Image: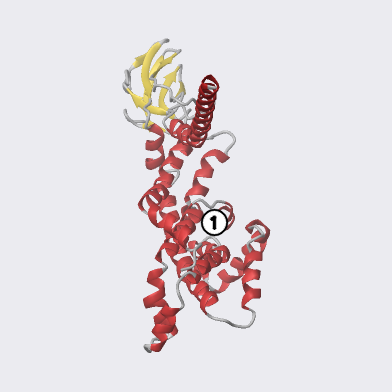
Amino acid sequence: MSNSKTTQRLSRKQTDLISLIIQLTILVGAVIFALFPIVWIVSAALNPSQSMSTQSVIPPVPETRVVTFDKTGTVVDIVLEEGTRVELSAELIMLIEVDGVTEEIRSPKNGYVRNYRVSVGDTVNAGDEIFDIGSSLLINFDTLLTSERQPFMRWLFNTVIVASITSVLTVMITALSAYSFSRFRFKGRDGLLVFILLVQVFPNLLAMIAIYLMLQQIGNYFPLLGLNTMGGLILVYVGGAMGINIWLMKGFFDSVPRDIDESALVDGANHWQTYWLLIFPLVRPILIVVGILSFVGTFNEFVLARVLLRDKESWTLMVGLWGYISDSFARDWGVFAAGAVIGAIPTLIIYLTLQDQIVGGLTQGSVKG
């Protein structure tokens, strides 16, 4: 009998151990699965080759290539100063005259022009080393932030402005709508709530043509809200964010006791004073949640911005980054990855700063107080 109990205990311990190992294995696998894209994109941003074919989890060590000349000639002109970064391979570096014909010496890869071994007027023999093309782990970030061809900082500024204004307007308008649905009883209230929910079932792509034509017509009367303007894009974003957020906020407003409204009305306050001075501060968690969701969704939106914005100076970040990989013959994957890393910083800061408010806003509204 004793031996049987001991065997059962050992079997139970073995079962618990196996269960623990399986749980830990699943947990580790889930963490790796979640973090791998982040590690990969950071590695791509640090890859100086700007090529996906040589991409690995650990970025390659930057190399320096020595450029030689295979003929005999005279240096006519040095186009780039030493230390200049060349953004594209085959960029002109210097001119060398060979038998009366001027030949162009171009960069074999992206990098920094270093260590000129010749100057204007010098004679170059076949096989002579003329300069180096060096690189660094941060060359993609350097290219991204200092390039004159692609105004990355302008795109980032446009995105922050659009996302910030959209989130503020969404919170203010949605809060007023949700308060009205929560506190007032009027004809068609239930049907309107259902209609708002049903509208959200259909994706924005179905309304793309209608939105484009609508902004085109609005722009004839209000140019700041037409096509190719941040105002028009904000108008579309705010309209699209109303539906589900009204339902989310209404649930939170319903959790606020109506006794507060009744007490305020007895004391002589009107509905606006009750809303702004009493109810609005109490629902701050859900306001923050809706604001963050609106900001992040707008910050990362691509399709509408790509269709409605045509001028490069008015592009948002996602549209600008798409330009780095849209050209079949000049895809700058490293610069694209560097832009993605920098573009993730504002969202990361917001989530880390307001994570407690996010959890509270998503959970408190589900329980009636």
Task: Say if residue 106 shows up in the picture.
Answer: no
Is residue 242 shown left or right of residue 195?
Answer: left
Quarter of the image with the N terminus in it: top right
Is residue 319 found left or right of 360 in the rendered image?
Answer: right
The front one of 240 and 233 is 240
How far across and down, in percent of the image, does residue 312 sit? 49, 51
Is 259 above or below relative to 346? Answer: below
Residue drawn at x 46%, y 16% as measured from the top left: 99
Direction front: furthest residue: 1
Q: Position of residue 218 (x, y in %)?
A: 58, 71
Where does residue 213 sit, x and y in percent of width and height? 64, 65
Q: Nearer the viewer, residue 175 or 31?
A: 31
Give the color scheme: rainbow, by chain, secondary structure or one colour: secondary structure
In this rendering, the answer to whether 75 lies above or below 215 is above
- Front position in the image: 107 or 292: 292
- Residue 302 horizontal/vertical position (percent): 55, 51
Q: Residue at x 47, y 33 (%)?
A: 334
Q: Which residue has dot 1 on it?
A: 309
Badge 1 amino acid:
Leu
Q: Quadrant of residue 192?
A: bottom right
Mark 1 lies on a secondary structure that is loop
**Relative to 154, is 305 on the left or the right?**
right
Q: Is residue 214 above or below residue 73?
A: below
